[in-house]
Each structure stands twice: as C-alpha cells, then as structure tokens.
Amino acid sequence: MTPSDVGPPAVQDYYVEDFAHCFGCGRLNADGHHFRTRAAGDETVTDFEPDAAHTALPDSVYGGLIASLLDCHSTGSAAIFALAAEDRAIGAGEVPRFVTGHLAVDYLAPTPLGPLRAVGRLVEATGRKVIVDSELWAAGAVTARAHAVLVRVRTDGGTRMGSDPG
Amino acid sequence: MTPSDVGPPAVQDYYVEDFAHCFGCGRLNADGHHFRTRAAGDETVTDFEPDAAHTALPDSVYGGLIASLLDCHSTGSAAIFALAAEDRAIGAGEVPRFVTGHLAVDYLAPTPLGPLRAVGRLVEATGRKVIVDSELWAAGAVTARAHAVLVRVRTDGGTRMGSDPG
C-alpha cells in the first residue's frame, strides 16, 4: 500500500483493503474516480478534474459528481480529523473508515468544468460521529457548500452504517 | 425526440436539447447514466440498476451514485409536478427544466447492488421553486431519503442557477 503518486499522502491510500473499493474514492476500484484527500494545516483538501462528459448544462459540472466528490471528501476528511485527534499521521497504523449518515449540498452557482478543489473543516467530533463542512472551489470561486455527518465503521469484519445512532 | 424505449414517457426524453446533456439524466450524454423519471399517480418514479463497479463497500452502492440518482430524480420530478400543475402531459409542449439549489440525503442503511427505485412526492411549489422529497428503495426496503429544493431555469438562452432566490 504505497501512494500512487509523489504528492502528499492521501488518506485513501491507506484504507484497509476491504474498504478501498468505493467508486468515488477507492484505490482498488479500477473504474472509479479515485478521489484522494490529504491534510492541509487544519483543513483537508481533495483535488479532482472531471471528465468532459461530466456535464450538467454544457461546460458546467453535473450536480451528482459534485455531491459524490463532496461525499467522499467528507468521509476522507473525517478519517484525517480522527487521526489528528489521536495525534497520528496518515499511514501510521490503520486508518479509520467513515461512512456517510447525512450529506447536504447547497449549489450556489454553476461549477465550470476544469480543476476542482474541495476544502473541509472539522465542525464537531463526538464518539463515532464526525461532522465536516466543506466548500467546493472552481475557477477561483466557491460554487457549492456541503455539510456532512460521518459515522465511523468497524473495519474488522463487522460493518455498521448510517442507520446506527453512533 | 421520441422515448428511447417502449415504457411510459420519461420527462428527460423531452428536455430541450441544450438542457439534455447532464451526465446523470441527459439523453444526449453518450457516457452518462440516462436516469429517466416518469409520473406514477401523484408520485414520480426513477428506476436504475447500477453497474457492478458502483460499489461503496463490496456489494453495496456508493453514496455518490445514490446522491446523483436522487438529484436528477428530483429535478425530473420537479418538471413533472410543474407540468401537472399546468394540467399538461409529458411531451405536450416544452418541458420545464429545473436545477438543484439544495440536496440533502439521509443514508439510512447500506444500499445493496441491484435494481433501485427512487420515488418522489411534491412537498411545495412556489413561484420558480419546487420542493421534492424522495425515498430510495432497494430489495424491498427504503435505504435513503432525500429532500431537494429545485429552481426553474430559463430554457430560452438565459440560465439561472441555484444562487438565484427564485
């Protein structure tokens, strides 16, 4: 399990294998988007450039991809914030894995095709639940905001999803 | 512009061409999902079967696809409800086109791979704004719920997105 590029480590590079098949962010999903989330100071960053086909109106990104990016960015951010709370670096021991219980996206303006950057901030962490707020940047402007509630799952064989009260 | 299959008409079959390129629901997007939304009594229905690659954890659907499906289902539903309010059938004249201002998804349980059905209900319609609540069904259970605020856009050349107060 080594990072697939020479940039700063991404948390998804270290998800345990059974939890690394997500179409959005799983490094082991051959067909997926391979979203990769890294720490940047107190924030988290996921950079992604959509394909030309990922349009809503011509030249703008369709809302489903934006939601997908912000979703996986939020689960990855929750893992990074959980590591930071334990004073651990990405790659130092097992990475915790979170799933989404709630995701809300406000679409503020059309998102132009081109490089996108999601930036996340920790709102709250209580028990197995982490709340992350994010902005989506495109061409120098914030075009969407997300509010996500993430729930930590067991990675030892038992899986517990968003229906679990945490 | 004829429906691409022999089922009941889908509202996306009648979107004006400039607004029919969405990766999620555009009939003119060669690479997209081609979500299709139809009326069913007072409700709306979008059926879709994800590819095997669209996983989160193995055998379950990743949250980004669920958000994408519920997003396009909601915009299509808003168009259907707007037509119904004018007592018009799908295909009778130009179909109104909505974009998403706000989308909130609650992930209640893992969504198994296999046929999915989104079912939508009108909550409120005021001016250019329509609110739609939806359920996602999979294998006989509701696995996610969505709340969406959709805003009608001009289809005559001017586009106005979710940042517009309606």
Image: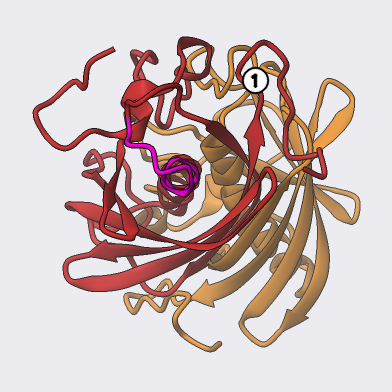
Chain colours: A orange, B red
Residue A52 x, y percent position in the rendering? 53, 12
The chain containing the residue under callout 1 comes to: A
* Frontmost residue, B23 versus B94: B94
Say if residue A11 shows up in the picture.
no
* Frontmost residue, B37 versus B110: B37
Magenta includes B13? no
Residue A80 x, y percent position in the rendering? 71, 59
Is residue A80 found left or right of A31 in the rendered image?
A: right
* Frontmost residue, A39 versus A66: A66
Residue at left 89%, top 56%? Answer: A42
Is residue B129 found left or right of A1 in the rendered image?
A: right
Residue at left 67%, top 26%? Answer: A6
Is residue A73 found left or right of B88 in the rendered image?
A: right
The amino acid sitting under disc 1 is: Ser
- Residue A119, image quadrant: top right
Q: Residue furthest front?
A: B87
> Across the whole image, how many numbered discs are drawn on residues?
1
SS label for mark 1: loop
Magenta includes B82? yes
Residue at the disc numbered 1: A60
Say if residue B147 shows up in the picture.
yes
Q: Decide: is B100 above or below A16.
A: above
Residue A64 x, y percent position in the rendering? 52, 39
Q: Decide: is B97 above or below A136.
A: above
Q: Residue furthest left?
A: B6
Residue at left 38%, top 40%? Answer: A28
Find the magenta span and give its range.
Answer: B80-90
Residue at left 85%, top 52%? Answer: A43
Residue B111 x, y percent position in the rendering? 31, 63
- Residue A144, image quadrant: top right
